[in-house]
Amino acid sequence: MESGLMIMGIFIIITTYVEAKSDNSILSKESLKIFPNTIIAGYILGSVSIITALVFLFMAFC
């Protein structure tokens, strides 16, 4: 379970990073307003997933 959470977190962060680096020229102005919030949410969600996995691992071994 912990390794799955870590993999999910890393996957979310990588896909968010790829989306952040993609070409945004075809997006509408409204999409561009929402886009930075989506990137921030992706990084937060990925980080929370990894931190949760680390807490579970810590609890399992201590």
Image (spheres, rainbow, N blue to C red):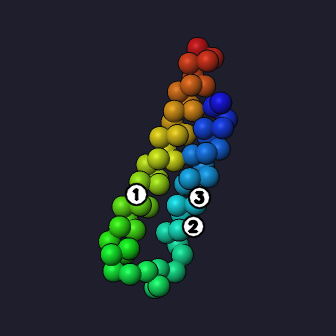
Secondary structure category for the residue under label 2:
helix
Which residue is under mark 2?
18
The residue that appears at 51% across and 33% down in the rendered structure is 52
Cα distance, mark 3 to mark 1? 13 Å
Are the two marked residues, 2 and 3, in contact with CB atoms closer than 8 angstroms? yes
Q: Dot 3: within a 10 Å radius of its alpha carbon, few (fewer than 14), some, or many (20 or more) residues?
A: some
Q: Is residue 35 above or below residue 54?
A: below
Q: Is residue 36 above or below residue 32?
A: above
The residue that appears at 41% across and 54% down in the rendered structure is 41
Q: Is residue 20 above or below residue 44?
A: below
Which residue is under mark 3?
14
Residue 32: mark in rendering = none
Q: Dot 2: within a 10 Å radius of its alpha carbon, few (fewer than 14), some, or many (20 or more) residues?
A: few
User: Tag 2: residue type?
Assistant: Val
Decide which of tag 1 and tag 2 comes sooner along the chain.
2
User: Tag 1: residue type?
Assistant: Ile
The residue that appears at 56% across and 25% down in the rendered structure is 56
Which residue is under mark 1?
40
Are the two marked residues, 3 and 1, in contact with CB atoms closer than 8 angstroms? no
Judge left or right: residue 34 versus residue 7.
left
Decide which of tag 3 and tag 1 comes sooner along the chain.
3
Secondary structure category for the residue under label 1:
helix
Judge left or right: residue 6 versus residue 44.
right
Quadrant of the image occupied by residue 28: bottom left
Cα distance, mark 1 to mark 2? 13 Å
The picture places residue 48, in percent across and down from the top left corner, at: 47, 40
User: Tag 3: residue type?
Assistant: Ile
Q: Dot 1: within a 10 Å radius of its alpha carbon, few (fewer than 14), some, or many (20 or more) residues?
A: some
Closer to us: 31 or 13: 31
Most extreme residue toward the top, as rendered? 62
Judge left or right: residue 60 versus residue 27.
right
